[in-house]
Amino acid sequence: MARVRAAYHDPDGTRYGIPTYWWRGAPPGYATRRQLRAAGLRPGGQPIAAQILWRGVGGTRAAYLYRVDLARPKRTATPAQLRAVRAALTARRTCPTCRQVRPYCIPRSLGECIDCHEGGTA
């Protein structure tokens, strides 16, 4: 085992407080949030079960692992929630000056669409 791997190998959690593994060294049954999401799951309120440590840009990096057997299915948005998101996104694209819905989000720095800010309304 390489020195770097040995430094991050703590399956009992005596050194780091929780079980710790090196990059790509975690046993089966653990997954990150991103891996759970790709499988259609979510942590579901469970605590962090383990972590992966590796040396990266800026120092030691960490990825937290959750148990797959305790994960719950992802929740789906209700039709009312989808309507609310759609309305909010439409409001971000509506210019307050000319009241037109643009194909882009109105820049907050300008407060209006680019055409209105440049002086001409299209």
Image: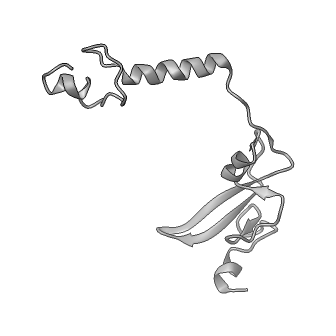
Question: How many dots with numbers?
Answer: 0
In the foreground, 70 or 8:
70
Q: Residue lying at the far front in this picture: please name it.
A: 122
Instruction: Work out whether 19 lies above or below 80.
Output: below
Q: Residue 49: name its quadrant.
A: bottom right
**Which of the pair 39/1 is nearer the observer?**
39
- Where is residue 95? Give x, y as percent: 30, 19
User: Is 102 placed left or right of 72 in the picture?
Assistant: left
Q: Is residue 38 left or right of residue 54?
A: right
Which residue is outermost to the bottom?
Answer: 2
Residue at figure coordinates x 60%, y 22% from the top left: 82
Residue 76 coordinates in the image, percent (x, y): 71, 29
Q: Residue at coordinates 57% horizontally, 65% vertically from top-left?
A: 61
Quarter of the image where one finds residue 84: top right
In the rendered view of the protein, which quadrant contains the C terminus?
Answer: top left
Task: Please report the residue visible at 75 percent of the width from the left and 61 percent of the height from the top.
Answer: 18
Q: Quadrant of the N terminus?
A: bottom right
Q: Nearer the viewer, residue 74 or 26?
A: 74
What scheme was used to colour the molecule? Answer: one colour
> How far from the left and from the top, in percent, is residue 62?
61, 62
Tell me what residue is drawn at x 87 percent, y 49 percent: 69
Say left or right for 118 vs 109: left
- Quadrant in the rendering for residue 3: bottom right
- Above or below 75: residue 98: above
Q: Residue 66 versus residue 17: which sits nearer the camera?
A: 66
Residue furthest right in the image: 69
